[in-house]
Amino acid sequence: MIFFRSDYSSGAHPRILEALSKTNYEHSDGYFMDAHCFHAIELLKKKIGRDDVDIHLTVGGTITNLTAICAFLRPHQAAVSAASGHICMHETGSVEATGHKIIHLPSTDGKVRPEQIDETVIFHEDEHMVQPKLLYISQPTEIGTIYKKAELAALKAKCEEHGMYLYIDGARLATALTCDECDVTLSDMAKYSDAFYIGGTKNAFLFGEALVIVNPALKEDFRFIIKQRGGMFAKGRLIGIQFEEMFKDELYFEIGRGSNEKAAKLREGIKAAGYKFMVDSPTNQIFPIFPEEMVQRLEKDFFFYRWAAPKDGMTPIRLVTSWVTTDEDIKAFLDAIK
Amino acid sequence: MIFFRSDYSSGAHPRILEALSKTNYEHSDGYFMDAHCFHAIELLKKKIGRDDVDIHLTVGGTITNLTAICAFLRPHQAAVSAASGHICMHETGSVEATGHKIIHLPSTDGKVRPEQIDETVIFHEDEHMVQPKLLYISQPTEIGTIYKKAELAALKAKCEEHGMYLYIDGARLATALTCDECDVTLSDMAKYSDAFYIGGTKNAFLFGEALVIVNPALKEDFRFIIKQRGGMFAKGRLIGIQFEEMFKDELYFEIGRGSNEKAAKLREGIKAAGYKFMVDSPTNQIFPIFPEEMVQRLEKDFFFYRWAAPKDGMTPIRLVTSWVTTDEDIKAFLDAIK
Amino acid sequence: MIFFRSDYSSGAHPRILEALSKTNYEHSDGYFMDAHCFHAIELLKKKIGRDDVDIHLTVGGTITNLTAICAFLRPHQAAVSAASGHICMHETGSVEATGHKIIHLPSTDGKVRPEQIDETVIFHEDEHMVQPKLLYISQPTEIGTIYKKAELAALKAKCEEHGMYLYIDGARLATALTCDECDVTLSDMAKYSDAFYIGGTKNAFLFGEALVIVNPALKEDFRFIIKQRGGMFAKGRLIGIQFEEMFKDELYFEIGRGSNEKAAKLREGIKAAGYKFMVDSPTNQIFPIFPEEMVQRLEKDFFFYRWAAPKDGMTPIRLVTSWVTTDEDIKAFLDAIK
Amino acid sequence: MIFFRSDYSSGAHPRILEALSKTNYEHSDGYFMDAHCFHAIELLKKKIGRDDVDIHLTVGGTITNLTAICAFLRPHQAAVSAASGHICMHETGSVEATGHKIIHLPSTDGKVRPEQIDETVIFHEDEHMVQPKLLYISQPTEIGTIYKKAELAALKAKCEEHGMYLYIDGARLATALTCDECDVTLSDMAKYSDAFYIGGTKNAFLFGEALVIVNPALKEDFRFIIKQRGGMFAKGRLIGIQFEEMFKDELYFEIGRGSNEKAAKLREGIKAAGYKFMVDSPTNQIFPIFPEEMVQRLEKDFFFYRWAAPKDGMTPIRLVTSWVTTDEDIKAFLDAIK
């Protein structure tokens, strides 16, 4: 069985395992209060190009999202997201479980547009309705599309106009920042958001993310909320060591770029074979549409998600590449659809 | 600096790192739905001696406690705990953040007694008060003492009498089950509880715990709650692999026993030097009381917790041993207090 | 200024005030544990024709909805509602504040259809998504339309098929049950729901609602949740006395019927004057569409809601009638639109 | 049966009923946005002597407490209260249900002392514990004792020293401010608190309280939270009309004073008969200790609370007087204990 199921189906980059082995017998204090975490955070600040942000290492995507959102909002305030957003669809109501409504916006390409923010704010007119306060987007989006710099800038400006925060989920940030279409840098992420996270799990870490809080109003007492929500990892340094290793040079970005290149090959091959895509996504998730019969046949040798039910005999599927995807995997798939 | 600060100050047992390396390039599905997790759970069921329990792998102690307690209780129901319990004191109100009060019971040795349950139930007489529904204890307790089999049986019987659940936090379970005083087995843990967890983080795992749900009424839909609270680890197999390695033979228990032996040496040496202890704890946490001046001197070379403020010039401290504590560490400490 | 703003713009039916005066100096126990509340509940059970339901008197609509929903659901379970439903739109995220997501369904006439339940259940396929567990509808709907008996029966059957509860908000139940189109009785409300409430505030009470819990699985410990959410009214008998008065004969229904008759006159007059309606609603809320200029002129003498922004120069407004609406009010309005 | 059970066992002062009758047919907008509410708030501000406070009318005590506390605190922040406080003991975990822990302080007379605040702040040392942020007290306390001006000032100063809010539950405020021992005025309540509420229900209203927010940092968006928690009363004017009537002259205070006078007579008579009290309370709740046999005899003719279980054959009970307590009631009781 060849896996195009996800970018978290295997372990970690070998340098990660080496770094963990090398530091295994060191003693250090827990809960991210150790030299490796401090150093990782310094490295991240340098890559971002700013010293005035707070960075917190975290265990995974869902817990980062729910911790950040519940820390940033007062009880009557709501998050706003594309209906396809991860917090809307695939986190089992984790944000609502902290007491906050998510306002769902329609979107065909996974992106939110500035005028939707206006409409949302106008619609929520008084205290009988929740107050839209935080825009959640992801970079790349749930379906692999990306926001360009001008789009981020426009969303940030719109949020500021309405006194809203812009929070960006970067579970697959490495692939966004390194894809050909993208003109956004890590610095831009900080410039055009109030907070965002740099995803590790899906980019060859064993696990771990880094939440960057840019807006000073959102920084206070954040470690309390991490602990309260269960994210205060005892051996916190394990995440610090991984970020150190990934950001001491360009490894983080190389891995993202590699995943994109694998996806590009797959995309080109599928296009050449005459198939269409549900959406035009430039990162490591692609969504070809195949005849249902072919999908059933492919399922015997390949492991992937069906993205939606068949329609007129055609079924969109999701293929995800990662640092462990091989040229042989790609060749096998392209052969199979010929 | 010699660490008696905690049992999570270094990495993992070498067999853990080897197992992660060996499996690194395997592909598998996420979220604990892989062969390693399934196998780990089978091994755990065998050690427990029961096939009728549900086992869920989890990321850490606090998130296990809050997930279990909020899954098991209805909104008006409360947890009951010794005031010194971890959920009362060191989890930043994580249980209350899920909506549930914790009723704090006084305790000098960290343990709850059956008659306290009676008193609590009688006191909470009607719907103007919360309903005590779940007794939380830990084995060993927050201060290293243990419940013997008869004590567990008595608490379980008392809980059943009042329609309450007994939930046991086993963050340091390995040291409890292997200490000389203890007549409780892993099977007994299931026999005398409705749910309990087997702690990994503090027993030479990188991280990871295993929640065992015994009471069928508490099993339904538990994976939804894990996901909702942020504990649905993407690369779930990492925890499965660690439990596999620890429970394929007796490694888990050997490590616990080793930690206890180190603590015993330290304890004997301190006793021999003429010092007293805050509590008589048979596991890997000990609480000697030293003159404040000596504590200040010790702090230069040793890293440990002060457990309480000085009183009449004497200060209780906590010393924790683990699988990485060496005979040299112990000798150095005993020399220092001479 | 003539009020068509709402059906809660004045005090109470004179018989309510008389009953409160007459009983003012009686002494009784608090929190709904008095003879008037017990008697009111007996009267309600008789009108419903069932003795096996639990009835709880409550203070207002929003607190009834949030108390019921949070009592009925486990943390990962969601309510399902038409997007126009009151809990979605006009209760400031009160359900989400108890931790539960509401799944919004599109609807043009305010009603949910059985096939939407199927689609919702299919879409929410696994533990990464919330579990749809409770269907919320209101009778009449937020825009004055009603469910006929066959429609309720079909929704209830569909809910049972999927293990879901059907909960009905009856804030304006009196007008639904007494409108010409409606073939639903109070008995049917219990037959085709797991719980529903009988609204008082909008039907000439000072305030107060009565929650009827039909499904035995939802009854346990409900008074705890009422108290916890702040609805355990100290002088509970005030609500009991009002329900006694309204249900000791047919007053409750007469008031509902009267409100509908006033709305019918208004509706006929507006129709006769050549105007259209946003929706065809047979109860005491009607939604005529007028030229924006006319709306601005009407606002000088009449107080009502604009229901939506003008479109192509035409604006839908909401007119609500009640037991205090007079024939003169109606004549004045109809004169004004000529 | 003669009632000393509570001060909410009968209806309302006749002037309240008259005012409701007189205004019954007025039309007004809902949700406290009407002329009566505005006028009531103006009257309250005048009595307080300050125009810079925000006042919100509310439905009852528990919902006021939970709404205020959840509006004022961030998720990791805790309320601090005497263990005997109403929010600790008799509100079914309503504060915890909004996500916040309450730290319980021991107290024999129902009062909190400034040094307890210091101890609490020192004890909660880091982010593994909740952050004590709001001190909850009630005036009078749960057992009828009062804070004098100097005590309030000292608590407020201590709260300011630690960046904490002081919130005062005034469910029975009328009796506190009018008792002989008390040197605190309504102005002082605002001066020495960040927020407090003026209780109506227990002082001859049908129902209703008024929350006064003094600290500007706590004012923003408060109406959203009222609505979200279910307290946005549709016919809000009903509460406005009651406060208007009570505060247009000295009626509110006269009723409080009257209740105290009745309690004083009862107290003197019981003292004269040779009995002791559990606590020395100068307001309308008194706690005599009688032989258990006598308590059983009294229960045949009088309705009151047993405050605690018998001890050495003696049982403390609670007697509460109110505006409807008569001299005959008192004489009957004093005769009965002779």
Image (cartoon, coloured by chain):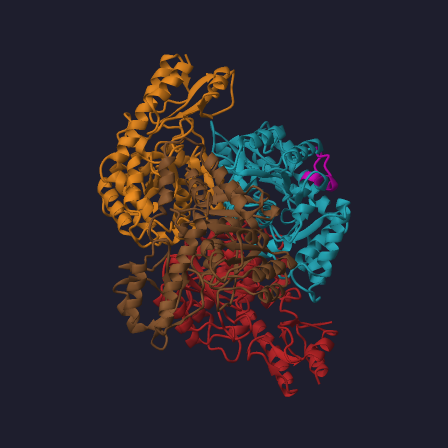
Chain colours: A red, B cyan, C brown, D orange
Tell me, yes or no, whether the highlighted magenta stretch contains residue D124.
no
Q: Position of residue C50 (x, y in %)?
A: 58, 45
Residue A157 in view of the camera: no
Is C329 above or below relative to D12? Answer: below
- Residue depicted at 53% across the width and 77% down the height: A179
Q: Position of residue C149 (x, y in %)?
A: 56, 59
Point out the image quarter for the N terminus of chain C. Answer: bottom left
- Residue depicted at 70% across the width and 82% down the height: A337
Is B291 in front, or is A104? A104
Q: Which residues are magenta?
A: B176-189
Point out the image quarter for the C terminus of chain C. Answer: bottom left
Q: Quadrant of residue B325?
A: top right
Left or right of A42 in this view: C307: left
Is B74 above or below relative to C120? Answer: above
Is C193 in front, or is B56? C193
Q: Position of residue A103 (x, y in %)?
A: 46, 64
Q: Position of residue C40 (x, y in %)?
A: 48, 41
Left or right of D299 in this view: B275: right
Number of marks drawn: 0
Left or right of B247 in this view: D208: left
Left or right of D83 in this view: A333: right
